[in-house]
Amino acid sequence: MNTLKRTLALVATIAMAATSLASCGDKTDSGNNTSTTTAPKTEATTTAADGGETTTASTVEPGKIADDVKTGGDTFTLASWNHDDVPALIAQWKGLDYDTIVEQLSDKKVPGVDFIDMNVKGGEAAEKFDQYFNDGTPIDVYFCEADWALKYINDDTKTLALEKLGFTDDDFKDIYGYTDAIGQATEGANAGKRVGVSWQAAAGGFAYRADLAKEYLGVNSPAEMQEQIKDWDKFVETAKKISEKTDKGVSLADSLGGLWQAFACERSTPWVVNNKVEVDDTCEKFAKTLKELWECNGVAHNDQWTTEWTAAGVSGNVMGYFVSTWGFGGFFLDAAGGEGGEQYGKWALCQGPTPFYWGGTWIVVNPATDNGEEDRDFIKSAALDYDNMKEFAVKKPEYVNNSKVMDDLISSNTVFNEKISGNFAENQNYFAELASNAKSIDFKGLITPYDATLKAAFADVVRKQYVEGGKSWDETVDAFLDKAAEASTDLEVD
């Protein structure tokens, strides 16, 4: 087997030391989370929403903007790859109409605010941001996606420690722990400090056709379905049962990609340790599980983001989809045929074999900002203010990154969106099924800048070499390591 050495030259390297997030997405005794203490802060340890500890050190006075952060700029500029979420956050902050905010921003009709809508896919945004930084484009706040966030979060020339805007650990006490991890730098001058925060949590679950589950499994509730797929062994067992009853006509799961989104969150070691790519036991377990499911058609052979992928839900050839919070009103609704479609209203949701998350976006601040007060106020409005987040959760709708907000809304049986809720049998409170997963995800010390590249490469090799090519596990690992070495110029093979 190949041994890889990494000369991690381009981006920051290794594992974060806190539990890990969310995108495309009740509170406390006080309607405002922001601390107003004035005592100087030295060091603090807090407990995040999932029980994980986060420790930061600071000499910045709480509630005050640091002297080296500029204020009073003429225009507050935000930049993102599309207008799916950011305009709504601006509307929330400024008290504007959600329905017209995109047009208002496009026409430069929001006084003092400029929104750069790059109109690209999330994965293309980093290249655009690099260009903006090189050109000196005056950006105050920008948005980073989970797959490449560390490129900026670990670069203190590109991101500002949030303590410099007066935020303290107490301000973040209600966010989900796994989202907090991605927002904390592990290298550079900001190491150990929080530089990004997400307004959304992107926990996932398993959405399935309730009528098909009753027909083939005798299942009458999400709790009963959960028992059928509570771990990966049970998942395979149930998939085989459905396959036998339908002569391989109905797959339990939507795709290799969906399966891998969930499975990858079970890793016990980072993808990179001491400059070497690690293939842990979870990887082999995934390969063997996938092969069993592939051979019995327990997982559909469709690729994600294709017409065939969602069409399989409409046709009934797929019983369930691994879905994250942001997907219920998107691809999953398409898989039901849309509102009023053939399969609309026939679905249910359970937690699935393992807690997992899929995606997420973080708000970060450019150190060159000249609008420190607006930076602070926007972040507070979008990601910390209890009342604002509660309203946004229902109005957008969004599974927001505040455990108290979500617990309060869920316990009061809030209907977050009638169109999305109507896709679930008996109007199931679908977010309630995700709350436990959101609090259970544990990515402590597991995040590296190479995760997206290595995850994609591994899934591709497992399918082509192990599942379809009939290669041994050792041969598959060798092929993966070779591909990993080719994926980036800073990978070397002995």
Image (cartoon, rainbow, N blue to C red):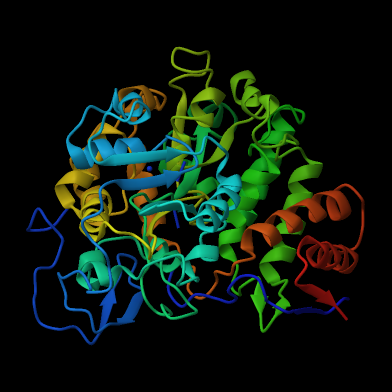
Left or right, 474 with respect to 39, comes to right
Which of the 4 quarters of the picture holds residue 32? Answer: bottom left
Residue 411 in sight here = no
Residue 192 picture quarter: bottom left
Q: Tell me, yes or no, if residue 31 can be seen here.
A: yes
The residue closer to the viewer here, 219 or 71, is 71
Q: Is residue 199 left or right of residue 336?
A: left
Give the residue displayed 72% in from the left and 79% down from the top: 7
Instruction: State the residue in front, 326 or 254.
Output: 326
- Where in the figure is residue 25, as x and y percent of width and height? 38, 43
Q: Nearer the viewer, residue 283 or 152?
A: 152
Q: What residue lies at 68% left-to-right and 34% top-to-bottom?
A: 251
**Where residue 345 sits in the image (x, y, percent)?**
43, 21
Note whether 487 is above or below 347 in the view shown: below
Q: Is residue 84 above or below residue 315?
A: below
Image side of residue 240 versus residue 184, left or right: right
